Image (tube, rainbow, N blue to C red):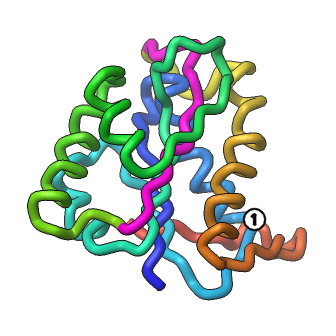
Amino acid sequence: MSILVLGIGNLLLGDEAVGVRIVEALARRFTFTPAIDILDGGTSGMELLENMSGRDHLIVADAVLAGHCPGAVVVLRDDEVPAFLTQKLSPHQLGLADVLMALRLLDEFPRRLTLVGVEPQSLGMRIGLTDSVLRAVEPALAQVIAALEQSGVTVTARAHKDADRGTLHA
């Protein structure tokens, strides 16, 4: 089984970084059986095509502009994701929509697709999440773990002393 958890976001734009922070916490705090790929996609667009290609399950963590209150967690699945991305744009979602379209054209679209999004409070220039989005990291992380478990992945918390050793693949 080929599963990728992809965090997207710009660390310099406040809450835009939430997707990256979610995958950092995932890699640092948990182990997975079978193994999965975890990637900090930053603000990359088409550069992610190869990493996303032909996956059994692609789980994307991201900031989403869905019109909810700041910190709300939104979960979209399969065909809901590309449809959502054509209507609601954050600074990098156009790139994600383009990659998903290219994957479909290349017949490499993931068999399952899950978007775990968090409504941002601020996308202004700042390093660090606002309090409302910081509080949403744990519920969003729980949704990512639930998506992994739905794909048959066993997610195990690392021993506390090992939680700082998690790594992200670049």
Image-quadrant location for residue 139: top right
169 w.r.t. 127: above or below: below
Magenta residues, start to end: 111-124
Compare residues 128 and 154 and report the one nearer the observer.
154
117 w.r.t. 133: above or below: below
Image-quadrant location for residue 86: top left
Q: Is residue 51 left or right of residue 150?
A: left
Residue at (63% x, 60% y) in the render: 147
x%, y% of residue 48? 25, 59
Residue 113 in magenta?
A: yes
Image-quadrant location for residue 15: top right
Compare residues 85 and 39 and report the one nearer the observer.
85
Q: Which residue is mark 1?
A: 29
Residue at (87% x, 72% y) in the render: 161
Residue at (77% x, 30% y) in the render: 135
The residue under label 1 is which amino acid type? Answer: Arg
82 w.r.t. 120: above or below: below
Task: Give the farthest residue toward the left.
Answer: 105
